[in-house]
Amino acid sequence: MTLDFLAPLYPWTKSLHLIATFAWMAGLFYLPRLYVYHSQVPPGDARSETFKVMERRLMKAIMNPAMIVTLLFGVLLILTPGIVDWRAGWWHAKLTGIVALFAIHGILAKDLKRFAADERPRSERAWRVLNEVPTVALILIVVMVIAKPF
């Protein structure tokens, strides 16, 4: 199903989708890094309290709204005539990358609550590894959308 009225809006839809995606990705890159530093300080420390504020504001004010807007404009792109060739295979791989981004967002959101409760849900090393997941997903998504290799 496509909606014909979206065709002339395509450049605007794509622009807004990308702007929201950039904001969301910035948060997906930065929040795990904050968790690395947060996991290094003891609960109750003044630095821990500062990290809690930074993490909460990043998630609530930037990441969640940007994720929602990214999803909204992504759906509008899908509904735009001629944008997705459903017979091509690239969109399956892109969808895999998108699922990875939503999964990492969910992990970050869940562990935000645990950090707020003065828990240390993962090791510093685990956060360093998780910090790479958004990068790999982004590479996959960009290659699929631009090069459409299959």
Image (cartoon, rainbow, N blue to C red):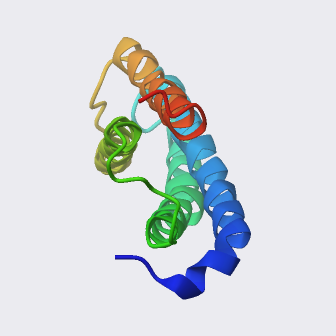
Q: Is residue 57 visible?
A: yes
Q: Indicate whether 9 appears above or below 98.
A: below
* Residue 113 horizontal/vertical position (percent): 32, 51
Residue 75 picture quarter: bottom left
Q: Nearer the viewer, residue 55 or 130?
A: 130
Quadrant where the C terminus sits is top left
* Residue 82 horizontal/vertical position (percent): 52, 64
The residue that appears at 42% across and 26% down in the rendered structure is 133
Residue 17 picture quarter: bottom right
The residue that appears at 45% across and 56% down in the rendered structure is 84
Q: Nearer the viewer, residue 40 or 91?
A: 91
Q: How many marks?
A: 0
Q: Indicate whether 123 appears above or below 18.
A: above
The residue that appears at 44% across and 31% down in the rendered structure is 137
Q: Is residue 25 left or right of residue 42?
A: right
The residue that appears at 49% across and 47% down in the rendered structure is 52
Residue positioned most to the bottom: 5
Quadrant where the N terminus sits is bottom left
Q: Nearer the viewer, residue 57 or 117?
A: 57
Q: Is residue 41 visible?
A: no
Q: Is residue 66 left or right of residue 1?
A: right
